[in-house]
């Protein structure tokens, strides 16, 4: 069946209004409090006649409003569901760094401003629009289309998809998932050409805490082995520890295509890629284990040697890496038994296949909408809720169908997050067409 006649100017206006309102719902996590966001989306779906809606409240004695929501648009049952996955929480803002209000839903000069504009309330609205259009135009679909808006992605998903995985696995059922994890960029590796990264796998978080104690005392008589001395020496050794380049199988295809399409001149050997990684932090992150030191806490007074010190490390491991072996190696690097290493969060995911019906649909639709564009299978440096689906054997792709300029991409988790209306329109068009075809 051919595509219905859709007034995209009108749809874009509608998507802009819906996103602008959505961005005024402050779901900063922590504490999250995602319930108003889940209710907002549910009301919009109900108004379209999509009323098979379930709320899942994961709140416990230490939290409230940790609500996720599933809306089903039933198909004819001849194929398994497509899940349109999005998270409703956002990371905090440092207001002073922003040029505009982050929770005002401001639309100005063709741009929609706000925390979550790209990550990922914008994508949530594109998914919502796809549901609306399928319903409004009575487009026949063999699969159920499940719109799943989850809480708590940004803090590890204990109150979101991990909760559903444990208590309501039926909410996660499907053959395919479309989620965040990859997006399009106007240039890559210094070459201007539209490229859509479609994440088939992702690095695994290995969040650790280093803790140590020592003798407190008067700062006028240092002994060189205080808790803080110890911690700083450990951190310095960690900084000096180098991590080898390793091209996992999921990435060989990424680099092979990058070479084929002219993004890299050299043949994609491990040596060439390692060389690129020295200049390009994203390439380095994709091809090696990494460690970021993210917090240090110690001390309370200028002239007192503190009795304890702790630091947090955000390590990201390549797909297939063994976290316990990595931690053991780290212990040897630190080389100080008085520095304890505690696990905070460790997780990993099996990859989704690079070749699938959904991947072919994505490639075709992208080519039809953006001239010269290419789709590259990608390993996301960040982790997403896709991991839970991949663990269950469901094919999950990270694919936000917008084309960001580098200066826009850095606003994700940073200051001044925003999305152009033009990109929102492109995203709605591509996503709708992908959904229509994979469900036809
Ligand atoms: Zn996100």
Image: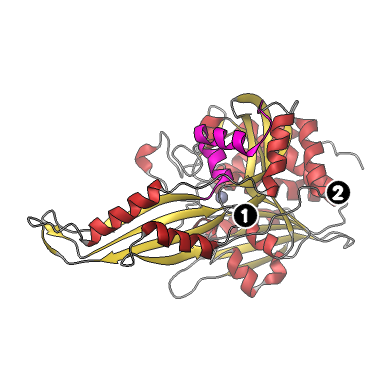
Q: Name the residue at 39% across, 62% down.
A: 209
Q: Nearer the viewer, residue 14 or 284?
A: 284
Q: What numbered label is drawn on residue 319?
A: 1
Query: In the image, which residues are magenta?
Result: 264-289
- Pick whichever, 434 or 341, lies toward us: 341
**Disc 2 or disc 1, which is closer to the eye?**
1
Percent across and percent down for residue 95 are: 37, 42
The outermost residue toward the left is 220
- Left/right placement of residue 314 relative to residue 41 reads left
- Mark found first going from the N terminus, 2 or 1: 2
Q: Is residue 328 left or right of residue 398?
A: left
What is the secondary structure assignment of the residue under circle 2? loop
State the image coordinates of residue 59 (x, y, percent, origin top left): 51, 71
Q: Quadrant of the N terminus?
A: top right
- Secondary structure that dominates the magenta span: helix
Q: Looking at the image, which is closer to me, 337 or 313? A: 337
Give residue 83's position: percent from left, percent from top. 73, 57
Query: Does residue 62 show up magenta in the picture?
Result: no
- 40 vs 63, left or right, is right
Circle 2 residue = 139
Give 178 or 284, whichever is nearer the viewer.
284
Residue 275 belongs to magenta span: yes
Report the residue at 41% width, 60% height from top: 332
């Amino acid at each position: 069946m051919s595509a219905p006649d859709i007034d995209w100017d009108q749809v874009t206006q509608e998507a802009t209004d819906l996103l602008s309102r959505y961005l005024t719902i402050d779901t900063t996590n922590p504490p999250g409090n995602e319930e108003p966001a889940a209710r907002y989306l549910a009301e919009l779906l109900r108004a379209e006649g999509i009323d098979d809606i379930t709320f899942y409240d994961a709140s416990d004695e230490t939290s409230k409003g940790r609500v996720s929501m599933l809306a089903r648009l039933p198909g004819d049952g001849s194929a398994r569901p497509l899940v349109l996955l999005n998270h409703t929480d956002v990371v905090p803002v440092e207001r002073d760094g922003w040029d505009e209000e982050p929770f005002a839903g401001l639309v100005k000069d063709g741009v929609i401003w706000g925390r979550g504009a790209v990550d990922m309330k914008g994508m949530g609205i594109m998914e919502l629009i796809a549901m609306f259009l399928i319903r409004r135009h009575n487009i026949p679909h063999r699969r159920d289309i499940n719109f799943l808006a989850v809480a708590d992605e940004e803090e590890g998903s204990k109150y979101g998809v991990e909760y559903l995985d444990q208590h309501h696995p039926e909410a996660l059922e499907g053959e395919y998932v479309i989620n965040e994890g990859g997006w399009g960029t106007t240039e890559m590796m210094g070459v201007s050409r539209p490229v859509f990264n479609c994440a088939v796998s992702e690095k695994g978080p290995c969040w650790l805490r280093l803790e140590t104690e020592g003798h407190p005392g008067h700062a006028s008589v240092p002994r060189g082995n205080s808790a803080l001395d110890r911690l700083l020496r450990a951190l310095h050794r960690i900084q000096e520890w180098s991590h080898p380049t390793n091209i996992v199988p999921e990435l060989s295809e990424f680099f092979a295509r990058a070479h084929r399409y002219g993004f890299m001149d050299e043949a994609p050997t491990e040596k060439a890629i390692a060389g690129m990684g020295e200049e390009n932090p994203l390439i380095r992150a994709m091809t090696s284990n990494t460690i970021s030191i993210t917090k240090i806490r110690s001390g309370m007074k200028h002239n007192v040697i503190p009795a304890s010190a702790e630091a947090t490390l955000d390590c990201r491991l390549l797909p297939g890496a063994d976290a316990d072996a990595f931690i053991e190696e780290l212990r040897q690097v630190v080389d100080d038994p008085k520095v304890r290493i505690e696990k905070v969060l460790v997780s990993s995911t099996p990859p989704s296949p690079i070749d699938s019906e959904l991947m072919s649909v994505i490639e075709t639709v992208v080519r039809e909408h953006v001239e010269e564009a290419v789709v590259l299978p990608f390993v996301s440096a960040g982790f997403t809720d896709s991991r839970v689906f991949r663990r269950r054997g469901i094919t999950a792709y990270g694919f936000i169908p917008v084309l960001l300029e580098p200066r826009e991409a850095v606003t994700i988790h940073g200051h001044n997050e925003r999305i152009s209306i033009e990109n929102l329109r492109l995203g709605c068009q591509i996503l709708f067409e992908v959904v229509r075809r994979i469900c036809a």
